[in-house]
Image (tube, rainbow, N blue to C red):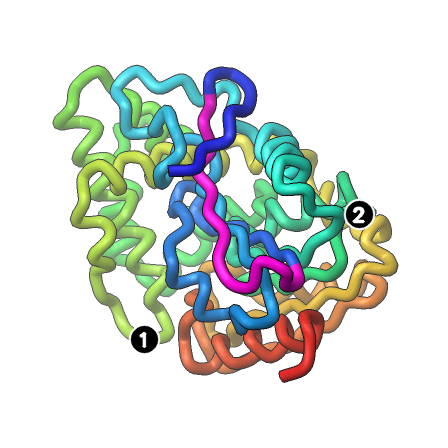
Amino acid sequence: MPHLDVTDGNLLYWEAHGNPNGRPAIVLHGGPGSGCDDGWLTFFDLDVHRVVLLDQRNCGRSLPHASEPDIDLSANTTAHLVADIERLRAHLGVDRWTVLGGSWGSTLALAYAEAHPERVTDMVLFSVVTTTHREVEWITRGVGRLFPGRWEAFRDGVPEADRDGNLAAAYSRLLHSPDSEVRDKAARDWCTWEDTHMSYATGFHRSPRYEDPVFRLCFARLVTHYWKNAAFMGEDELLRGASRLAGIPGTLVHGSLDVSSSPDVPWNLARAWPGSELTMVRAGHDGSEDGMLPVIRKALLSFGGDA
């Protein structure tokens, strides 16, 4: 399996698909911690693009894995991930590429493009988030007004003394407990809440990926690691830096039924990013929904070649 040796003992898994001579594109998955599977390829015409899938640090097939009992996540920050993308680009001999990012991946895509605008030809972002303190507070507290019973159960999954504070930080502490039963319960509680707000548009259902205890723990640890630190960035840092994206065409696709990320996030970003366009569709947070998938495909083709 192809791994790229980066810093701090990390080995990043990547793979390439499609036309070897096609337009290069990098996929930045969500979570953080979801990993990048072949489902992302459905967004692309593989005759047009050379698509690079990457498992970000400590998740998917990258090593070490965040589910390991004594994992150290101190070398896993947005700045580290941005540097990893640049190392992979140089390793592959790519000069510039299309960037596709969904959910957390849209935050990472913006951070990468603002740091290295000369390396980005265009971007397609969906279910857009910038992972500010305000957004984390919404997704861990504010949106609970739509699901009062399930939110109360989520809140009560942490010790009483922590229930009025940073819930992501409280869960992170539980997820790193030396007691495996405490870790597993915290991971289950966290992922049940993820299912609750993520599936608002289609009705509550349990995602099969959370049935895997290894994935569940990895995912919950990485999400809480980033959320408790608001992606290791200043409040509205990405919005304030959006002027650096001038000259990079961008399509933002967001669901009108997405309660995980309120539409004001992409709305404000589109106003601050010269050359970007926001398309609202009747969908939730999942980019594979019928309302969102064709819009993302069309946007990628409009940048990547003739349909």
| Alpha carbon separation for disc pair 1 and 2 | 37 Å
Quadrant housing residue 250: bottom right
Which region of the structure is painted magenta?
10-23
Q: Which mark is residue 202?
A: 1
Residue 252 or 139: which is nearer the viewer?
252
Q: Amino acid at mark 1?
A: Thr
Image coordinates of residue 21 in percent, x first then y, are: 63, 60
Residue 18 lies within the magenta run: yes
Question: In the rendered view, would you say 6 is above or below 198?
Answer: above
Residue 272, percent across and down? 81, 59
Q: Residue sitting at 84 percent across and 49 percent down? A: 244
Q: Are marks 1 and 2 in contact (CB under 8 Å)?
A: no
Foreground pick, 48 / 269:
48
Q: Amino acid at mark 2?
A: Pro
Residue 20 is left or right of residue 156, and the answer is right
Q: Secondary structure at mark 2?
A: helix
Q: Is residue 60 visible?
A: yes
> Which secondary structure is most common in the magenta stretch?
strand
Q: Circle 1 sits in a helix, a strand or a loop, which is it?
A: loop
Q: Nearer the viewer, residue 200 or 89?
A: 89
